[in-house]
Image (cartoon, rainbow, N blue to C red):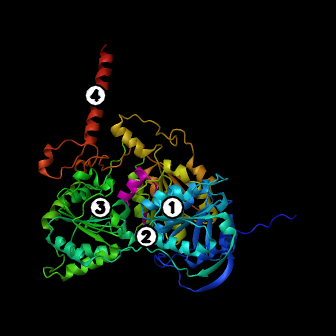
Amino acid sequence: MSAPTARPGPSARRPAPTAPAAPAPATTPNRRQVPPERVTGAQSVVRSLEELGVDTVFGIPGGAILPVYDPLFDSVKVRHVLVRHEQGGGHAATGYAQATGKVGVCMATSGPGATNLVTPIADAQMDSVPLVAITGQVGRSLIGTDAFQEADISGITMACTKHNFLVTDPIDIPRMLAEAFHLASSGRPGAVLVDIPKDVLQAQTTFSWPPEMRLPGYRPVTKPHGKQVREAARMIMEAKAPVLYVGGGVIKADASAELLELAELTGIPVVTTLMARGAFPDTHTLNMGMPGMHGTVGAVAALQKSDLLITLGARFDDRVTGQLDSFAMNAKVIHADIDPAEIGKNRHADVPIVGDCREVITELIETLKADPAATGTPLLQLTDWWTYLSGIRDQFPLGWKTPSDGSLSPEFVIEKLGQLAGPDAIYCAGVGQHQMWAAQFIKYEKPRTWLNSGGLGTMGYAVPAAMGAKMGMPDREVWAIDGDGCFQMTNQELATCAVEGVPIKVALINNGNLGMVRQWQTLFYDKRYSNTDLGTHTLRIPDFVKLAEALGCHGIRVEKEEDVEAAIREAQSINDRPVVIDFIVGKDAQVWPMVAAGTSNDEIMAARGIRPLFDEDEQVAEPAIIHEAMLHEQATLTAHEQAAQKGTSE
């Protein structure tokens, strides 16, 4: 028997797909008529993906899914990216979807291959990202027998998918895949799983296109009710301290242009949540910044002191509201969302509006313009409100202190990166301190330029998501901003980038610790640093420059402020392989402002020892929990000093 002939990989046979002209989510199957033909179930999967416009799939082959990989080898339309771990494939598909607006696709085999996709599936579902995960399954006769590599992935993911399918007849493959893509990308986007037994993939069937979708109970409402829009417009015209509270739904709806028009028409201040960074230009004078636990003092004050929240595609997440019963206590609420389940879930809506954010905003603009009282631009006279907010914004701008020990400031690094890479670059962040600094100190002017794991908070998201974003938008500069903790979870995907020719750039904010955990231990656990030192500073294990080079990347190390710009420019000049810059930063840097978890937004701390008071009568308010923690810390230090002095005198 002769040895098998090696086949060239996908990247050797065809170039990477070019960047799409504009985001074009596949909400309905391609209507091109394909006459019936006899194929295998596996061929039907590949043909369906081609008809659905899929150009990239991230995955790893294995026994149960292997039948799909044979016809996939012959496809000239679908590029398969062989990732190094299924979790990386799932996050790459998410990054691809977030950057392009299209459905991201990942693939894995049964059992452990499928279960390795659970985290990225849950991550995509939490952040409303259109994702289709295709998994192989053991043969139909083996389901429920604890067969080799069997896992009930449909049952496992039931709570973290928008919908999932178990295909039991090969004739259903085109229909179920078309339905999966429609469900993932329409209404509130989300994650959909399609689980296909191996014998279904191997069976003969008939393929034709387009299939007839059968989703009788699924009809997302996109057009808002006119009466609700008119009531919202009336409340806006009467408000004295309104705020446009903007969430990620505005980006999902491609409604940034409409949001800008609404804000400028009314003169209402805008706050953009972590998932909405870039939905409204950061440099616009109406932008008060990001609200929430690590948001700007101005944005938090705007929400707390508002008399009307115009909530667009946001879900009143606990990281934004703080202690819910003290959130914006004097505000009435207009809540517009594509998902009716979100309206009233956390905060009562005085005017609920179910609909697509772009259609809601468009109709709201038309209604406001038609109001007889609407004269001049802006329509609202908010002089007193803006005087108050401008004062807060000017008094408490974002900033940082240069470390006294001479170490490199992480905030300086990230701000400089944003200045050099600019508003057209795509920034993908992991989870932790570096994520918050990236949200704070980079100016986001356009949608789909800021990608992160906001809801689930998944460490290890950044590198594979950056890979997916770069493959979806190959002409854009893509940076993964990662911490040394997150980076060690998925850095193996840099090998994928190197092999596939995906020149992402990684800004590694290396503070030698699990930084956000360490910050909480500093503030709330008497500086008892239990299991947060990673050894990347003290032992330099691993050596990230050597690791980068071993993974086929160019590695750079920076320890001084004067070397930061040169290193970033060097990374920008290298486009034949990925680049990793190991920024050695101080371990004691902390993220400010901060609202301690479970406390009121009124207790926000602008920095250590600096608590803004939104009104003069707040002078008598109880001290913030962070302030109390610092008083305890100071008392402990004083006690130690007194004990030391007593010992010296004796």
**Picture quarter containing residue 398?**
bottom left
Q: Is the residue under label 4 in contact with that under label 3 (CB below 8 Å)?
A: no
Q: Which residues are magenta?
A: 429-450
Going by the numbered disc 1, the residue's amino acid type is: Ala
- Of tags 3 and 4, which is closer to the observer? 3
Q: Residue 465, labelled with which disc? A: 1
Q: Which residue is mark 2?
A: 424
Quarter of the figure that contains the N terminus:
bottom right
**Picture quarter containing residue 442?**
bottom left
SS at badge 2? loop
* Horizontal side of residue 302 vs 582, given as left or right: left
Residue at (62% x, 68% y) in the render: 80
- Picture coordinates of residue 647 (x, y %)? 33, 17
Q: Which residue is mark 4?
A: 638
Task: Compare residues 608 and 461 and report the one nearer the observer.
Answer: 461
Counting other residues with Cα less than 10 Å from the Cα at mark 2, is it few (<14), some (14-19), or many (20 or more)?
some
Q: Kindly report the distance in space between the C-alpha atoms of the residues bearing marks 1 and 3.
A: 25 Å
- Picture coordinates of residue 577 (x, y %)? 59, 63
Q: Is the residue under label 4 in contact with that under label 1 (CB below 8 Å)?
A: no
| Residue projecting furthest to the top | 650
Q: Kindly report the distance in space between the C-alpha atoms of the residues bearing marks 3 and 4.
A: 38 Å
Q: Is the residue under label 3 in contact with that under label 1 (CB below 8 Å)?
A: no
Q: Residue 523, labelled with which disc? A: none
Above or below 573: residue 178: below
> Which comes before the other along the chain, label 1 or label 2?
2
- Picture coordinates of residue 453 (x, y %)? 44, 58
Q: Is residue 370 magenta?
A: no
